Each structure stands twice: as structure tokens, then as C-alpha cells.
């Protein structure tokens, strides 16, 4: 039996501006991401990859079509409910880490949970458990400037999926890292997905896309190809670096 669909995008288009100045960032996107599945998104600069992530995570709304997260159509929710669903259900990992410099690793991870109304003590316990999961329990009380790039990115991953968040959106998470550290980060992302989350990974490197279950290729806002766990689409899986 197939795993449940966590994210569903149907006929999604996003247009910025009007008239002759209109920019069609996405056109007619249909995409499903199931629990336990990591989908890589590739394409040239300006193809709509980052727009796809912002729509998937409810940071923006489509001009046409629908985006459903855990069965909830995002555009049908008011601003407060959409923000609450996004905060509790979606985790973001960015190339530049986006950690707060004045907070320790544990504080960066626990802050979103405290904003959800979780007590500081429980939020710290969850943060420490998340750090343990990514192999960084020892950096709990270090500030971002006291950590390496790879450590900061692992802290960002722990923050993205602490608590009940089940959708991971990663925008070039390995872009600022060396090759070996990038592989370590992908191994951690893959483990979180295999543990029951779902993920969208934007990357420009095929070796990192090879960690995904399938890859969607965008050009000019349109899906032009897809490879992965489907009949006749096994090119990336042939080099997928998993045991």
C-alpha cells in the first residue's frame, strides 16, 4: 500500500505582476509528495524552483490551482490558520542556514516550539533530542559563530523537523558546504525522510539529487521531465548512494 500523500499541488500557476510586465513563474504544476518520500527539484536559474518551495510551504499562494498540505487546502485558510499550519507542519532548510546569531544551537531549535506555546523546558528537551539525532548533542550551548558550516546546517535541519513538522523544504542546503560535508547533510536529510517525513529538495547537483526517490525537472516554470521510482525512469536510482 502506498504511503499517504502529504503534499498535493494541482494545476498550480504563479504569475507575478500584470499585463506586459507579468512573469509566469510556474505554469500548470501537478505534484504529489508522500510520507517517506524525498523529491528533488532541478532546473536552471529562473526556472521556478524557489517559487515552488514557497507555494508548497504556504509562504505564498498560487494564482491558479490548489496546494494541499495534510489534506488542508492552503488557499482556503485564513492568514492566521495558514500561518499556524505552516509553523507546525513545515520545516525549512536554506543554503545560508538562517540561524539567529545571538542564540545557541539549542535555543535556535527550541524557539519555534516555544512560539507554538510549548514550555521552555519541554522545548529544550525536544531540541536536545533533535541535536542527538543529527549527531551534535555537544554543540547545544554553542553559538552559530562557534560552529563549522556543516554543524550549522545540521542544527538548521534539527530546527526544521523538531516537533510535529512532517514536510521538509530544503533550498540548496548543501550549496555552502564542501563535498564531504554535503554528503553528510544529505545522509541526515535522507534519514529524516525515511523516518516518516516528506521532503522537497532544490539542488543543482545531480549527486545530491541522487539521494531522492525521484527528481522533477523545471524549465520556464513547467515540469519538463521526471525520473525516479516509476517504470522506465531509473537513471538516478542507478547511482543513488544508499545501502
Image (tube, rainbow, N blue to C red):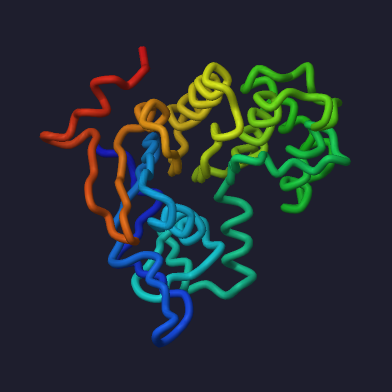
Tell me which corner region of the image, top left, top right, bottom left or bottom right, holds residue 198. Answer: top left
The residue that appears at 31% across and 55% down in the rendered structure is: 219
Q: Residue furthest left?
A: 232
Tell me which corner region of the image, top left, top right, bottom left or bottom right, holds residue 111. Answer: top right
The residue that appears at 55% across and 35% down in the rendered structure is: 175
Q: Residue furthest right?
A: 102
Q: Is 48 placed above or below 133 here? A: below
Choose between 151 and 38: the one closer to the eye.
151
Q: Is 61 placed above or below 126 here? A: below
Tell me which corner region of the image, top left, top right, bottom left or bottom right, holds residue 204. Answer: top left
Q: Residue furthest bottom?
A: 19
Left or right, 53 with reference to 43 = right
Task: Please provide percent x and percent y for residue 88.
Answer: 61, 51
Choose between 123 and 152: the one closer to the eye.
152
Q: Indicate the quadrant containing the C terminus: top left, top right, bottom left or bottom right.
A: top left
The residue that appears at 54% across and 32% down in the rendered structure is: 174
Specify whether residue 70 is in view: no
Q: Is 3 placed above or below 77 here? A: above
Q: Indicate the quadrant containing the N terminus: top left, top right, bottom left or bottom right.
A: top left
Amino acid at each position: 500500500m502506498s504511503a499517504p500523500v502529504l503534499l498535493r499541488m494541482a494545476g498550480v500557476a504563479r504569475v507575478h505582476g500584470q499585463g506586459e510586465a507579468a512573469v509566469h513563474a510556474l505554469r500548470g504544476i501537478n505534484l504529489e509528495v508522500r510520507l517517506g518520500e524525498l523529491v528533488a527539484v532541478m532546473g536552471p536559474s529562473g526556472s521556478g524552483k524557489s517559487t515552488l518551495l514557497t507555494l508548497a510551504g504556504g509562504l505564498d499562494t498560487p494564482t491558479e490551482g490548489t496546494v494541499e498540505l495534510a489534506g488542508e487546502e492552503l488557499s482556503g485558510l485564513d492568514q492566521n490558520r495558514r500561518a499556524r499550519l505552516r509553523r507546525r507542519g513545515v520545516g525549512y532548510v536554506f543554503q545560508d542556514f538562517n540561524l539567529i546569531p545571538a542564540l545557541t544551537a539549542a535555543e535556535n531549535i527550541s524557539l519555534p516550539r516555544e512560539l507554538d506555546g510549548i514550555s521552555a523546558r519541554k522545548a529544550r528537551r525536544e531540541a536536545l533530542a533533535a541535536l542527538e539525532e543529527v549527531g551534535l548533542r555537544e554543540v547545544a550551548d554553542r553559538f552559530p559563530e562557534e560552529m563549522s558550516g556543516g554543524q550549522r546546517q545540521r542544527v538548521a535541519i534539527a530546527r526544521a523537523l523538531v516537533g510535529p513538522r512532517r514536510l521538509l523544504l530544503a533550498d540548496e542546503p548543501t550549496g555552502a558546504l564542501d563535498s564531504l560535508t554535503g554528503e553528510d547533510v544529505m545522509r541526515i536529510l535522507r534519514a529524516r525522510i525515511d523516518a516518516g517525513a516528506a521532503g522537497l529538495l532544490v539542488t543543482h547537483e545531480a549527486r545530491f539529487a541522487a539521494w531522492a526517490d525521484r527528481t522533477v525537472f523545471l524549465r520556464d516554470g513547467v515540469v519538463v521531465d521526471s525520473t525516479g521510482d516509476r517504470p522506465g525512469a531509473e537513471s538516478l536510482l542507478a547511482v543513488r548512494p544508499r545501502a
